[in-house]
Amino acid sequence: MNSPPTAADSQAASPRPGPVAQTIQTLLRERRHDELVALAERTVAAAPTNAEAWNLLAVALRRLNNTRAAIACLRRALDLDPGNPTAMLNLGAACGETGRPADAAAWYRAVLERQPSAIVWTHLGVALHETGDPAAALAAFDAALALDPAYARCHVERAHALLRLGRFAEGWEEFEWRWRLDPADRPALPRLASPRWTGEALDGPLLVLPEQGFGDTILCARFLAALRGRVPRVILACKPELLRLFSTLEGIDALVPTNVAAPPHAAHIPMMSLPRLTMRAGDAPPPPARLHVPAVSRAALAPLIAPARGRLNVGIVWSGSVTFKANAQRATALERFLAFAEIPGLRLFSLQKGPPAADLAAPGLGPIVTDLGRHCADFADTAAAIEQLDLVIMTDSSVAHLAGSLGKPIWNLLPHAPYWLYGMGGACTPWYPSMRMFRQEGPGGWDQVFAAAASRLIKQLAKPAGDARNHEGIR
């Protein structure tokens, strides 16, 4: 889920006048956060009973991701000035960042009693959504839009709540407000002279552009087939990591990498706008796109998996992209997955990529977890690995979309407020029929999620079968 601009950002944008305020603005704008902390510390030392000085230090510390220390500073500010709305607003944002959305909501309500605004109502809506109550979040978003009907950030957050509630037609419509966000907050797209396609007839090719992360691109690839017959020709721009995987996608006439100039075309559309134009109200989600798994990739990875034949071969992923702002809420530690290795008849294979894969270098892990990720140069390689495993157990990331699209049994371990795709509850999703979901009962509730998954694995392996891979009900 995307989050609105932090409360600290909202307040720091209009500091008190004077030379110090101008310096703060410069340091914030230029992301010179260490210097900002040093300035804030000097300000507190000079005025230790000034609540705004403590609030400034909290802003600086949050920019360095030291949120716990920021909360301590904000508590000090409120001790000095109990009704300070700036400190309460920033404390709400800090609580949200540390996985305490209910506390965040309480602070936002306290601010609204003193200074109601569309921004604070939107913050409250996000916090309520993250507590697992998108219906209450919608009420907060509606209150925000009653004050400022053109507040784009609120519309975008409202879209996420609608989508999670399964109100897709309304949600996709609201999601188009993302193009009215401030330039720094809009999805990054290349500058093109062509118009954005809105469903009208075209006399030339349509260029489809990737948007957001790899997972969303794989998710929305299913909508490309619906373009057949609506436009003369479809060109899909594709990140290099997905080129081989998408090389045989239904509904496209040409595939071009994103790192080259766009070919001639009549109009363009971002992939996340495809559902709005192809999915009618009441429609069930179309099936996942058929992906290409190269034979050469299968052959290269087969020897790494073959030694574990006769066991339940389980792929694991414990983190998505570390650059994704909300990754901390959906990711967990490799150590939690090691409990599965204690179950007889099971072997673990890592599909993890990126910086978290370095966790596999810990002494003694090599014989316990086979590292397939380092042998996967792109998503086609990862798909070939997944095909040869029996099950994937993971926290949510792009690999979940990949495994679900391949029809591979996947157990997706979800945070308390997951991506809209996974709805309000239950173990199944129509978006990926082979997926089973294990949900946190409360924010940070990983212990219960892993215990439930381990219990199901033990029961699965206890069923009589000559080969663990032949057990039914693994999904």
Image (cartoon, rainbow, N blue to C red):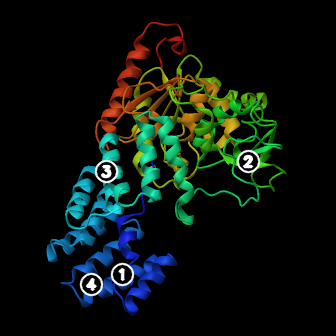
Mark 4: secondary structure: helix
Badges 3 and 1: C-beta atoms under 8 Å apart?
no
Residue 408: x %, y % from top left: 57, 24
Residue 310: x %, y % from top left: 56, 16
Distance between mark 2 and mark 1 Cα atoms: 44 Å
Distance between mark 2 and mark 3 Cα atoms: 41 Å
State whether residue 123 is above or below residue 475.
Answer: below
Q: Residues within 10 Å of mark 4 (few under 14, many from 20)?
A: some
Does label 4 or label 1 sit earlier along the sequence?
A: 1
Which quadrant holds residue 136? top left
Distance between mark 2 and mark 4 Cα atoms: 49 Å
Give the amino acid type for the residue marked by disc 4 in the picture.
Val
Badges 4 and 1: C-beta atoms under 8 Å apart?
no
Q: Residue at x 35, y 50 (%)?
A: 142
Does label 3 or label 1 sit earlier along the sequence?
A: 1
Which residue is labeled 2 in the image?
240
Which residue is labeled 3 in the image?
140
Q: Residue at x 16, y 76 (%)?
A: 81
Distance between mark 3 and mark 1 Cα atoms: 27 Å
Does label 2 or label 4 sit earlier along the sequence?
A: 4
In the picture, the disc for residue 44 is: 4
Which residue is labeled 1 in the image?
15
Is 260 positioned to the left or the right of 281 in the image? right
Give the amino acid type for the residue marked by disc 1 in the picture.
Pro
